[in-house]
Image (cartoon, rainbow, N blue to C red):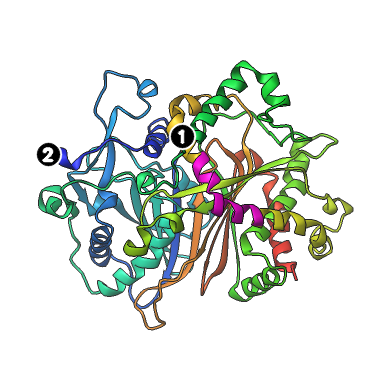
């Protein structure tokens, strides 16, 4: 039995993710590494590697969330009826599964998307590792499946930066561990108390008294003085034309996927273009994705004479603003937010009929938007506005009521961009385990029409994984083809 000193109440972000998991509003995100080398990943070397990895992070990922008060409804309690505590045992077989597949492709990602790491389950982890042996290319693909309560995409990237190092240290372990954590044997390693909520490590997500007061004033004005709020306080969206809506939202977390790669040489050319325009990769690939989406899928679905506006998101990492990273190194947890961009439609240059080779001709029309996104990202890193807004939602909003209100509406984000950057485990060519490529996938859940996820590796180049609503299955190929062609043609 877990001692009381090793339990705590959830933080305000953690409460939100309790709702998303228990309420069935989200499935998972996952990051996959493609591995080559002279040694195979086995239960022996992987179990010992995972044990070393858990110790390195002070056992953060042995925690789960448990309902401790059944006398109150989840919606009313909004997470306060749960507690955080370590599992009593974490067996290797419960967190790792080996499978043989024909090939690792979009179908594999769709299967992975339907998984939901369980909360409120005895000895259940909020993550799982799948090792796929691909018959097509003879490679092994190791997928790290994550719930958002304890992890974010950067943690998935960090997993694949560090796991090859542990595997290269434990490569000759043949006897697998039965348990990679046992509370009775390991509780002396947990300290006097368990680790607190990551969102409380600093003031990154916390609103000032003035911001809190403004939040409630805004909420009150929208409800009781909507005309005043819109006309005089500017609190209602007035973008014209209206944002693309699409179909009515259902409580359905299914997603479909497409994936492609740019080789290291092709990525080098793309980065050279970014450098020439004094831009980073993210605003360039995001703008071109939105431009292509508006000219293909959105143009077809909207079925109106006027091209709709967009509401897009760019994920941003908050770790540079956490002081503890300077002494502790990488911190596992959910420490991200997203900048939100409401914009009128981009130029419809593709309507001229030249669909794949004109990206360079219209770059002068796209550059203002690319620079706008870059400046907004930079400004956000200074003001931390997206983190404060995210914190405001988490701390001041009942997540259950907010998420239950989504089905039946139509307001999704048009596009999400999430770039995990370069994954470099620092292994040498003679290493037993070599990371050859990586793939980052996440669920559209109830919030997004399309997601573009990016990672890059030295051998695989730039990996692009596109998640989209299943209803767009007959339209997505045109978008993917033109998007890839535009990235390759850019000079």
Q: Is residue 223 above or below residue 491?
A: above
Residue 150 vs residue 254, the one in the foreground: 150
Q: Residues within 10 Å of mark 1 (few under 14, many from 20)?
A: few
- Provide residue 317's location: percent of width, then percent of height: 49, 54
Lower position in the chain sequence, tag 1 or tag 2:
2
Which residue is the site of mark 2? 1
17 left or right, relative to 179:
right
Q: Is residue 81 magenta?
A: no
Which residue is the site of mark 1? 209
**SS of the residue at dot 2?**
loop
81 left or right, relative to 485:
left
| Magenta-colored span | 375-389
- Provide residue 29's location: percent of width, then percent of height: 46, 48
Q: Residue furthest top?
A: 224
- Provide residue 35's location: percent of width, then percent of height: 42, 69
Residue at the spot x=40%, y=55% of the render? 322
Q: Residue furthest right?
A: 352
Which quadrant, please, contains the C terminus?
bottom right
**The disc label shown at residue 335, or none:** none
């Amino acid at each position: 039995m877990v001692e009381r000193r090793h339990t705590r109440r959830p933080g305000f972000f953690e409460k939100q993710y309790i709702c998303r998991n228990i309420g069935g509003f989200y499935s998972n995100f996952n990051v996959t590494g493609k591995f080559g080398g002279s040694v195979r990943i086995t239960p022996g070397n992987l179990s010992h590697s995972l044990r070393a990895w858990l110790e390195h992070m002070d056992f953060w990922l042995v925690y789960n969330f448990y309902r401790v008060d059944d006398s109150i409804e989840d919606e009313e309690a909004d997470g306060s009826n749960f507690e955080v505590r370590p599992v009593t045992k974490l067996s290797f077989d419960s967190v790792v599964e080996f499978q043989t597949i024909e090939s690792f492709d979009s179908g594999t990602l769709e299967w992975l998307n339907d998984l939901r790491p369980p909360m409120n389950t005895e000895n259940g982890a909020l993550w799982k590792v799948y090792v796929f042996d691909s018959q097509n290319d003879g490679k092994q693909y190791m997928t790290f499946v994550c719930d958002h309560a304890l992890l974010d995409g950067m943690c998935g990237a960090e997993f694949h930066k560090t796991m090859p190092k542990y595997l290269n240290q434990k490569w000759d372990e043949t006897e697998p561990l039965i348990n990679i954590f046992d509370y009775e044997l390991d509780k002396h390693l947990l300290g006097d108390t368990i680790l607190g909520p990551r969102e409380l490590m600093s003031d990154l997500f916390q609103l000032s008294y003035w911001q809190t007061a403004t939040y409630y004033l805004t909420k009150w004005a929208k409800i009781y003085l909507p005309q005043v709020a819109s006309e005089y306080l500017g609190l209602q969206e007035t973008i014209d034309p209206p944002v693309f809506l699409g179909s009515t939202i259902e409580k359905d977390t299914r997603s479909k996927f497409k994936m492609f790669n740019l080789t290291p040489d092709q990525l080098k050319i793309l980065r050279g273009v970014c450098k020439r325009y004094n831009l980073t990769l993210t605003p360039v690939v995001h703008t071109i994705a939105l431009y292509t989406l508006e000219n293909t899928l959105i143009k077809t679905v909207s079925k109106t004479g006027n091209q709709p506006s967009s509401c897009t998101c760019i994920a941003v990492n908050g770790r540079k603003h956490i002081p503890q990273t300077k002494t502790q190194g990488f911190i596992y947890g959910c420490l991200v937010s997203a900048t939100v961009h409401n914009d009128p439609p981009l130029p419809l240059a593709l309507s001229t009929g030249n669909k794949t080779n004109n990206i360079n001709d219209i770059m002068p029309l796209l550059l203002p938007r690319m620079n706008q996104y870059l400046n907004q990202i930079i400004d956000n890193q200074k003001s931390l506005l997206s983190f404060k807004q995210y914190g405001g939602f988490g701390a001041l909003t009942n997540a259950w009521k907010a998420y239950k209100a989504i089905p039946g509406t139509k307001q999704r984000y048009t596009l999400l961009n999430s770039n995990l950057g370069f994954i470099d485990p620092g292994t040498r060519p003679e290493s037993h385990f070599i990371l050859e490529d990586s793939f980052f996938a996440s669920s559209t859940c109830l919030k997004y029409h399309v997601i573009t996820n990016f990672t890059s590796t030295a051998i695989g180049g730039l990996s692009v994984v596109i998640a989209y609503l299943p209803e767009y299955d007959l339209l997505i190929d045109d978008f993917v083809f033109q998007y890839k062609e535009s990235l390759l043609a850019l000079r």
